[in-house]
Image (spheres, rainbow, N blue to C red):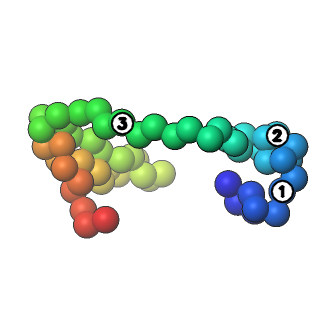
């Protein structure tokens, strides 16, 4: 959240900030999953191919 560290707790919450003490990540997908991103000009870019990132992260 941009400038989140400078915000009061109320401002942070009003901007959609999350103050939860717990965080859980989970992955979905499979080796058959392909994802493409769509650019503003409607061209597409591969994001994931066969469940793996399609670019170096």
Residue at position x 83%, y 56% from top? Answer: 7
Q: Which residue is mark 1?
A: 7
**How far apart are the alpha carbons under marks 3 and 1?**
29 Å
Viewer-closest of 54 and 16: 16
Neighbor class of circle 3 (other Cα within 10 Å; few <14, some 14-19, many 20+) is few
5 is higher (above) or lower (below) than 48: below
Judged from the image, the secondary structure of the residue bearing numbered disc 1 is loop
19 is higher (above) or lower (below) than 54: above
Q: Position of residue 17 (x, y in %)?
A: 71, 44
Q: Which residue is mark 3?
A: 26
Q: Earlier in the sequence, mark 1 or mark 2?
A: 1
Q: Earlier in the sequence, mark 3 or mark 1?
A: 1
Viewer-closest of 33 and 5: 5
* Quadrant hosting residue 29: top left
Q: Which residue is mark 2?
A: 14
Tell me: 6 left or right of 47. Answer: right
Q: Position of residue 37 (x, y in %)?
A: 36, 47
Residue at position x 56%, y 38% from top? Answer: 22
Q: Position of residue 21 (x, y in %)?
A: 62, 41
* Residues at marks 1 and 2 touching, judged by CB atoms closer than 8 Å: no
Neighbor class of circle 2 (other Cα within 10 Å; few <14, some 14-19, many 20+) is few
Tell me: 44 left or right of 23. Answer: left
**How far apart are the alpha carbons under marks 1 and 2?**
10 Å
Residue at position x 45%, y 37% from top? Answer: 24
**Image quadrant where one finds the C terminus:** bottom left
Judged from the image, the secondary structure of the residue bearing numbered disc 2 is helix
């Amino acid at each position: 959240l941009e400038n989140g560290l400078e915000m009061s707790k109320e401002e942070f919450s009003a901007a959609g900030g999350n103050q939860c003490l717990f965080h859980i990540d989970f992955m979905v997908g499979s080796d058959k999953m392909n994802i493409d991103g769509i650019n503003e000009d409607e061209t597409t870019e591969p994001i994931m191919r066969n469940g793996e990132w399609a670019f170096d992260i």
